[in-house]
């Protein structure tokens, strides 16, 4: 059993070996531990070295950079064709079949024409195949991002004078001073979407270059889950108009969810019966099929492609039943084949959408990285978060020139991809081939597809996020703070807006962390007889209080925000507030002095006053030593060091000693630099363990009966 003491002359630590209980007469034999010499940092030299390393270019370095940027170069030559090709082809085909109807459906959510959703999924698959480090995630259209894009698109479309409800109407904007002054709503919407996507990709690439991926650390699982659930309510609300076949304006700003429902009920009398019946039938088919896929996913070799079946059947019924002509049912309309000529984003729109692109970029990156790490851990390989940022950023920058909008990983499609035998990202190429076939040949066949069917597909795919309510009781039992964060983020995202909801969720999470360190647990420890175990008296049974010793544990870093709480907790747990005792003693001394001035003579006054002062100073307490367990204190700041020094000084004045135990190196260094071991504070000893401190205090008190009579070097 040993204790640590800092040598005042240098950075040497003096370890005193306290005697055992029975070795009362044994002298302390200090053991000297010399710290290793710390080399002075030459900042200029290090900076020059790193700059040379970054700026130098050799063939080997260029090759490594290129291989790191395109991981496919590393893994594709090692591809195990016989073992993996069948699984990759199967999963690629199935995901491609699922992506076709979802890409068309989510295009409506993003305020775009169906063809642009197919473009987006196609390019995302190819680029992530080249640059991604995850073998299993499916990158493409994601509902929450589509919602955020759609809100910006509708805002800009309305601002520039286009009719939100008439996609065929053209308008001329006085502020739109380019060679193409005349542009219909669809044309302008994709310009806004692609410009927004380009800026999101720029942000993601910039975060990758400056390695600020730590931002995603502040987006906890509970926060992302609450955000996705809250956004799901907004998505569901935005699709109700398609299910009912009514035309309403899209609400913007805080409270858009409530405002949209107000619009729905105001126009409920205009409901299209044909769309309502079609929506109900599609729901009756899709929901059971989804449940079957979920319940029997271990037995089914491939999930039943319910969306594709519904889309095919609904398109045929709509086409041959002439639902658009007879019942005025809204349809997808003309979906062209092939690819449009690449165009650059609209640079004049960047000032208006730059701020909106930032939360989209952060959410897209955070979801992609979290899914990548989750499936990598499950299958025993690693992913590079920084490269994932480059990959997803490139998936947004390049497609922005090809009439696409923002993409990220999507959980539902990733689960399907993994469960159907995916081994590598080669399956993404197969998915891209399926989408290419649709783009070149099949797309026009969806002309008669009703929009209500696409709305149903979007709503059914929200099941996963909405089912989080079922997990709330379990989440509450595991961690109540995370559950509250989930609720706050969910409600703010749904009732206020997605962007503000995300900001509120992050802010609330940070506040929760601050509060938990500002008001941490502070406990008194007891001893388990016959062992060297010391634990919380309020939590465990069979623990005993030590005679003459109090053990206090503070379960947080000690810094400026909680230093007062530290002192209050220490005074409360030990039952002795030295500041009050010192003040009371000084008042009593002044009172006695005033009384003595009238009663004593010049010859005897001094002796009587001294006797009274000595009696006042000899106040007895139940304990003579306080041991502070620092095992959970990760660091001390200047205010924390001052608090420890103040506590030591105050208790010393009333005859109670302070010992520290289980201090890490950072805490010891902070105390040394803060002067805690200086000025002859020979009693400020630091021990390796609580038991060492207990044995030291017990032996010294038992041997001498008075702490102040002992001095050790």
Image: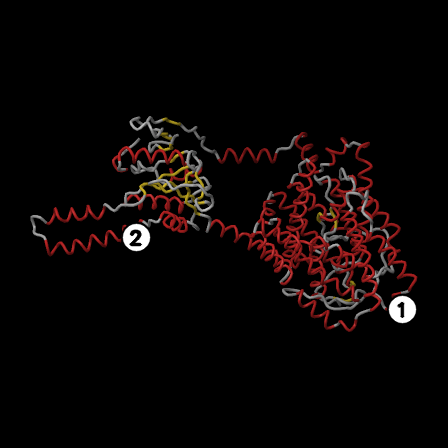
- Residue occupying the point 29% across, 34% down: 702
- Residue occupying the point 88% across, 52% down: 442
Q: Which colour scheme is used?
A: secondary structure
Q: Position of residue 127 (x, y in %)?
A: 75, 43
Q: Position of residue 140 (x, y in %)?
A: 74, 49
- Residue occupying the point 30% across, 52% down: 580
- For residue 390, what is the image quadrant? top right
Whether tag 1 and tag 2 are in contact, CB under 8 A, the answer is: no
In the shown orientation, is residue 357 left or right of residue 243?
left
Q: Mark 1 points at which residue?
A: 326
Give the farthest residue toward the right: 320
Which structural element holds mark 2?
helix
**Viewer-side residue, 336 vs 475:** 475
Please tell me which of labels 1 and 2 falls first in the chain: 1
Please, is residue 179 above or below residue 672 in the view?
A: below
Residue 580 numbered mark, or none: 2
In the shown orientation, is residue 614 left or right of residue 96?
left
- Disc 2: CA contacts within 10 A as few (<14), some (14-19) or many (>=20): few
Disc nearest the viewer among 1 and 2: 2
**Viewer-side residue, 25 vs 111:** 25
């Amino acid at each position: 059993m040993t204790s640590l003491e800092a040598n005042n002359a240098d950075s040497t630590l003096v370890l005193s070996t306290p005697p055992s209980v029975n070795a009362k007469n044994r002298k302390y034999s200090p053991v000297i531990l010399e710290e290793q010499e710390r080399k002075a940092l030459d900042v200029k030299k290090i900076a020059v070295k790193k700059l040379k390393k970054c700026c130098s270019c050799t063939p080997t370095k260029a090759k490594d950079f290129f291989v790191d940027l395109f991981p496919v170069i590393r893994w594709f030559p090692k591809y195990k064709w016989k073992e993996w090709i069948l699984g990759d082809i199967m999963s690629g085909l199935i995901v491609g079949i699922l992506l076709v109807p979802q890409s068309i459906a989510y295009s409506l959510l993003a305020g775009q024409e169906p063809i642009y959703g197919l473009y987006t999924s196609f390019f995302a698959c190819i680029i992530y195949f080249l640059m991604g480090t995850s073998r299993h995630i499916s990158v493409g259209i994601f509902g929450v991002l589509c919602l955020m894009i759609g809100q910006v698109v509708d805002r800009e479309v309305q601002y520039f004078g286009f009719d939100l409800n008439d996609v065929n109407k053209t308008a001329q904007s006085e502020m739109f001073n380019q060679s193409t002054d005349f542009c219909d709503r669809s044309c302008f919407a994709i310009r806004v979407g692609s410009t927004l996507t380009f800026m999101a990709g720029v942000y993601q690439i910039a975060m990758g270059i400056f390695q600020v991926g730590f931002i995603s650390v502040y987006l906890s699982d509970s926060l992302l889950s609450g955000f996705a659930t809250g956004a799901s309510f907004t998505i569901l609300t935005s699709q109700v108009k398609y299910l009912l076949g009514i035309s309403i304006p899209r609400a913007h700003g805080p409270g858009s969810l409530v405002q949209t429902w107000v619009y729905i009920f105001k126009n409920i009398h205009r409901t299209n019966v044909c769309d309502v019946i079609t929506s109900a039938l599609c729901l009756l088919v899709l929901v059971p099929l989804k449940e079957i896929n979920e319940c029997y996913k271990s037995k089914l070799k491939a999930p039943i492609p319910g969306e594709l079946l519904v889309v095919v059947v609904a398109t045929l019924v709509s086409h041959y039943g002439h639902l658009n002509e007879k019942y005025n049912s809204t349809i997808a309309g003309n979906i062209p084949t092939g690819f449009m000529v690449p165009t650059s984003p609209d640079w004049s729109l960047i000032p208006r959408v730059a701020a909106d692109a930032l939360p989209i970029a952060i959410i897209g990156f955070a979801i992609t990285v979290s899914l990548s790490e989750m499936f990598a851990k499950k299958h025993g390989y690693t992913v590079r978060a920084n490269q994932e940022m480059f990959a997803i950023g490139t998936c947004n920058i390049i497609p922005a020139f090809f009439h696409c909008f923002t993409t990220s990983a999507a959980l539902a499609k990733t689960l399907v991809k993994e469960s159907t035998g995916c081994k590598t990202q080669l399956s993404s190429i197969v998915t891209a081939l399926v989408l290419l076939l649709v783009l070149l040949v099949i797309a026009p066949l969806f002309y008669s597809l009703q929009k209500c069917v696409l709305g149903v597909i979007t709503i059914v795919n929200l099941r996963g996020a909405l089912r989080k309510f079922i997990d709330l009781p379990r989440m509450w039992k595991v961690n109540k703070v995370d559950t509250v964060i989930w609720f706050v983020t969910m409600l703010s995202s749904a009732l206020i807006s997605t962007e503000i909801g995300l900001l509120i969720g992050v802010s609330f999470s940070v506040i929760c962390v601050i509060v938990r360190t500002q008001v941490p647990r502070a406990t008194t420890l007891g001893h388990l007889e016959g062992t060297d175990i010391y634990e919380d008296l309020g939590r465990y049974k069979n623990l005993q209080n030590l005679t003459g010793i109090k053990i206090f544990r503070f379960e947080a870093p000690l810094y400026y925000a909680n230093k007062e709480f530290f002192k209050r907790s220490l005074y409360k747990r030990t039952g002795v507030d030295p500041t009050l005792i010192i003040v009371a003693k000084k008042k009593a001394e002044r009172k006695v002095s005033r009384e003595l001035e009238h009663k004593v003579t010049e010859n005897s006054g001094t002796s009587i006053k001294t006797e009274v002062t000595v009696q006042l100073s000899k106040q007895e307490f139940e304990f003579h030593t306080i041991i502070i367990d620092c095992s959970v204190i990760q660091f001390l700041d200047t205010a924390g060091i001052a608090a420890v020094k103040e506590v030591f000084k105050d208790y010393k004045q009333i005859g109670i000693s302070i010992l520290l135990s289980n201090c890490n190196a950072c805490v010891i260094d902070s105390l040394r630099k803060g002067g805690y071991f200086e000025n002859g504070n020979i009693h400020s000893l630091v021990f390796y363990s609580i038991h060492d401190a207990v044995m030291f205090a017990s032996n010294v008190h038992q041997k001498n009966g008075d702490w102040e009579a002992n001095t050790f070097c």
